[in-house]
Amino acid sequence: MTRSTPAPTAILPVLPDDPRPPLGDRIRGWWEGLTRPAQWAVGVPIILLLALLPLFPPPGIATTNNDFSVVMAQVAMYCLVAIGLNVVVGQAGLLDLGYVGFFAVGAYTVSLLTSKNSPWNATGPGGWLDSRWAWLACLPIAVAVAAISGVVLGMPTLRLRGDYLAIVTLGFGEIVRLLADNLNEITNGSLGLSEVAHPEVGQSAAKPGGLFSQGNLGKHDSLNPLERANYGTWWYWLGIVLVVGMLLIVGNLERSRVGRAWVAIREDEDAAEIMGVPTFKYKLWAFLIGAAVGGMSGAMYAGQVGFVNPTKFDVINSMLFLCAVVIGGQGNKLGVLVGAFIITYVPLRLSSVHLVHDTTTGWIFVAISVAVFVALLVVRSLVAQRLPRWAQLVLSTVVVLVGLAGALLLGSVLVLLPGGAQNLGDLKYLYFGIALVVMMILRPQGLFPVRQKLLAYGRQVYRAVRPVRVPVGARG
């Protein structure tokens, strides 16, 4: 009796199972597993809770030096800006450093048509605009003018790529600002345009200018929430409507042929062209849509503030818009909303923390800066765990020294401030600049990176067909 020899086996590579996915992926997977009615059943209550924030602000988030409802209205406006810029930068991969130009076009379109000191005022005697609905009537006009400006800019420049395109867009933003500053007979120059129209609805003895008027301070001690609502609350609610509408439109575009073309262009434009994607056409689409949303947010800004002048539209604000997209996560339309909230709410919240300009306080800032910066960079060094011990030691030492140098530089800047900053909110550009540097070092994809759907799909396919130990004799 002979002992049977086991058939030889072919050992094929088997990748280990992925660890437990991050919380964000689990939440996203749960959300995408819901039916469309179930998504609406979950999403609508969340939107309603967000809408109630100005009426019932949770403890600890109220802004001391600024009305909370006005702050939330500004958050909604910056969310619109972030959605539009994310289409251009995050989804299509086009670096736009002059997005504030489209924001200015929308603001000046509404202002020129409705301001009392504008030569093109259409709300005066004999004008073709009813003053009560002038702002709402001018909103689609501002969107259209901004979209046309996006096409005019994109037609000759979208053949460029990378840094060259960034320089051209930066120049566009500066051209718009300089035109607004120097066309005195039209834009009133640096003095700006005042008394810009707003929706004049809900007028009463207590609210002579209507629900959207700046003169309505509200009754903050009233038991009726609607009586506590001032003009900022109504602008916030209008902003939520516009943000939700744009999220639906951009989300549908993202899932369509247009969105897939944007992703292909962002990842590799040359490969997209080889595969037959008309890249110029879809880049122009991205510019048009982004410019239109920028014009919408500019129109909202002009109506809420009631005054427009060129100082709001400088390159620094354009960089601030870009911060919202980079910090939130390029390509993630919900992540950029978080970025917009950070760049708007945090400086206004910190404005209640006043600075004392003395050496002791300055060196306290030095110590805090050193601790935070070094901690972040040491965490970054932990990525090199697979290196040899000596390499880890050298790398950690270099990282700590770099962190110390950067933190000391920050502390020195704070110490030597010539009394110009009165509170922490005044240092927002410094903080966001440092935040961008830290993000590029530790998490370049942003707080909420866009999901890599192709990689996720590939992992699912691999799990379904991945090889196992198969006896050679059993293979057909």
Image: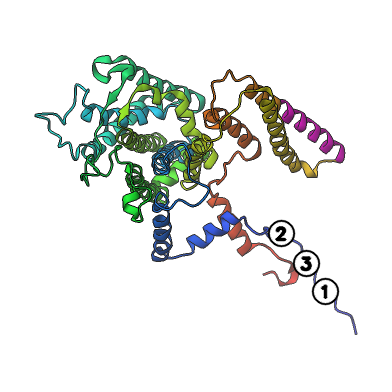
The reply to whether the magenta stretch includes residue 383 is no
Q: Main secondary structure of the magenta part?
A: helix
Q: Earlier in the sequence, mark 2 or mark 3?
A: 3
Cα separation between marks 2 and 3: 20 Å
Circle 3 residue: 9
- At horizontal 79% and vertical 34% (from top left) the residue drawn is 395
Q: Name the one closer to the observer, 321 or 33.
A: 321
Assign a secondary structure to mark 3. strand
Placement of the C terminus among the 4 image quadrants: bottom right
Numbered label attached to residue 6: 1
| Kind of residue at badge 3 | Thr
Decide which of 451, 123 is in the foreground and name it: 123
Asked if residue 401 is among those painted magenta in the image, a careful observer would answer yes
Q: From the top left corner, tell me how far across and down residue 292 is, in percent.
A: 33, 36
Instruction: From the viewer's perspective, tell me whether residue 402 is left or right of residue 146.
Output: right
Residue that carries the numbered disc 2 in the rendered image: 16
Task: Pick whichever, 59 or 467, lies toward us.
Answer: 59
**Counting residues from the N terminus, which is met first, the one under dot 1 or under dot 2?**
1
Position in image of residue 437 (x %, y %): 61, 31
- Magenta-tinted stretch: 389-405
